């Protein structure tokens, strides 16, 4: 009996340790937002519910933004200080430092990591999902959480609402965060967009500036932004970006590497940067074009973020990481929510 009791105790202890060290996606009982944690370490928060400015956790000093000729925003940014949802913030670094920014004073619509376009065309009208004008992504309540020994995953559905009255696009976002390794933490993103009506297209600002997967970071000391895009004759053509530096709350440098998947339409997307804003992105669609969303035909975009310590990994390591993400043997993230409901 003593042996059985001891075995039971050991099993309970093992379960408790596992619970403390497992990577998990859970709903915050107070805010209703989804948190991913790796043991006792916070990883990221997916804001599925509406976030108001009064709830902002980002209190660090705003960037000193220099206005440029192609800056399309008004001097008074108050019309862009709009409650928002369907984005990732905060994302934490290896030492628990805050990497992303929300509710910045210079561009209050910038919201951590978010997937949005400044030109959403519906018929002959334009809305701005990026700057939260006219068209908005609204949660449907359909959300699935998956906890695996090696990763935690969020799958969430949103509907793009034109003037908050007409549903035009059904979106499903997949966010999968893996346990941290010596190479950093992998966060995979996959998005599926399906038009619910005719005559819908997506474009970058002026069809040539920004739009797509948007990443607004905190401004670190010793900031370094780097890009790589292989020659078009290379096989494969690898593309990535990195922003690193010394972020507040950490004694060592860290950063975020962004990889594109080669199956994305218009791959490789042009990398856009605004260093004064600590803002980078792999833009979509191709410059000078509008991407038409056809009812019943999904647009799927995939990316991999790698949160790492230190400065940008050397090129040989990044090539290896890109190859791993783009390998045919690497299973794609699978959407479980149906395309049509």
Image: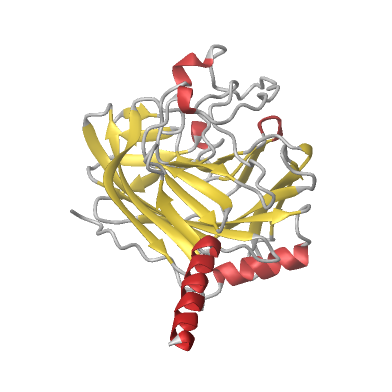
Q: Position of residue 32 (x, y in %)?
A: 37, 41
In the displayed structure image, the side of residue 210 where residue 254 appears, left or right: right
> In the picture shown, does residue 84 fall above or below 89?
above
Q: How is the image coloured?
A: secondary structure
Q: From the viewer's perspective, is 284 left or right of 186?
A: left
Q: Residue furthest top?
A: 76
Q: Residue at x 42, y 87 (%)?
A: 1
Q: x%, y% of residue 136?
A: 34, 33
- Residue 296 versus residue 143: which sits nearer the camera? 143
Q: Nearer the viewer, residue 269 or 340?
A: 340
For image coordinates 65% across by 47% down, the residue present is 96
Count all numbered tags in the image, as a single digit. Answer: 0
Which of 56/183 is in front?
A: 56
Q: Quadrant of residue 51?
A: top left
In percent of width and height, residue 259 lies at 60, 57
Is residue 175 visible in this depiction of the protein? no
Q: As drawn, is 131 to the left or to the right of 314?
A: left
Q: Is residue 55 among what the camera can see?
A: yes
Residue 214 in picture, x, y percent from top left: 54, 41
Farthest residue, direction front: 2
In percent of the image, x 28 and y 58: which residue is there? Answer: 337
User: Which of the pair 275/10 is nearer the observer?
Assistant: 10
Q: Is residue 131 above or below residue 77?
A: below
């Amino acid at each position: 009996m003593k042996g059985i009791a001891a075995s039971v105790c050991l099993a309970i202890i093992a379960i408790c340790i596992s619970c403390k060290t497992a990577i998990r996606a859970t709903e915050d009982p107070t805010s209703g937002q989804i948190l991913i944690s790796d043991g006792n370490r916070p990883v990221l928060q997916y804001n599925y519910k509406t976030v108001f400015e009064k709830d902002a956790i980002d209190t660090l000093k705003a960037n000193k933004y220099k206005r440029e000729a192609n800056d399309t925003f008004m001097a008074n940014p108050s019309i862009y200080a709009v409650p928002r949802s369907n984005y990732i913030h905060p994302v934490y670094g290896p030492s628990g430092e805050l990497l992303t920014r929300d509710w910045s004073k210079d561009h209050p619509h910038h919201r951590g990591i978010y997937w949005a376009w400044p030109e959403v065309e519906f018929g002959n009208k334009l809305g701005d999902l990026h700057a939260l004008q006219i068209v908005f992504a609204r949660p449907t309540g359909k959300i699935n959480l998956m906890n695996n020994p090696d990763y935690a995953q969020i799958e969430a559905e949103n509907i793009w609402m034109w003037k908050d009255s007409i549903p035009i696009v059904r979106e499903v976002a997949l966010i999968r965060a893996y346990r941290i390794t010596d190479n950093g933490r992998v966060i995979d993103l996959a998005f599926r967009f399906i038009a619910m009506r005719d005559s819908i297209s997506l474009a970058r600002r002026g069809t040539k500036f920004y739009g797509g997967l948007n990443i607004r970071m905190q401004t670190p000391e010793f900031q370094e932004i780097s890009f790589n895009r292989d020659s078009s004759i290379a096989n494969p053509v690898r593309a990535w970006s990195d922003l690193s530096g010394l972020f507040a709350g950490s004694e060592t440098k860290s950063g975020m590497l962004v990889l594109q998947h080669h199956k994305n339409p218009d791959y490789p997307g042009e990398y856009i940067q605004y260093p004064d804003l600590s803002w980078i992105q792999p833009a979509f669609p191709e410059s000078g074009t509008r991407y038409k969303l056809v009812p019943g035909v999904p647009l799927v975009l995939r990316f991999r973020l790698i949160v790492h310590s230190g400065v940008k990994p050397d090129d040989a390591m990044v090539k290896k990481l890109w190859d791993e993400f783009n390998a045919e043997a690497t299973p794609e993230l699978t959407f479980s929510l149906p395309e049509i409901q």
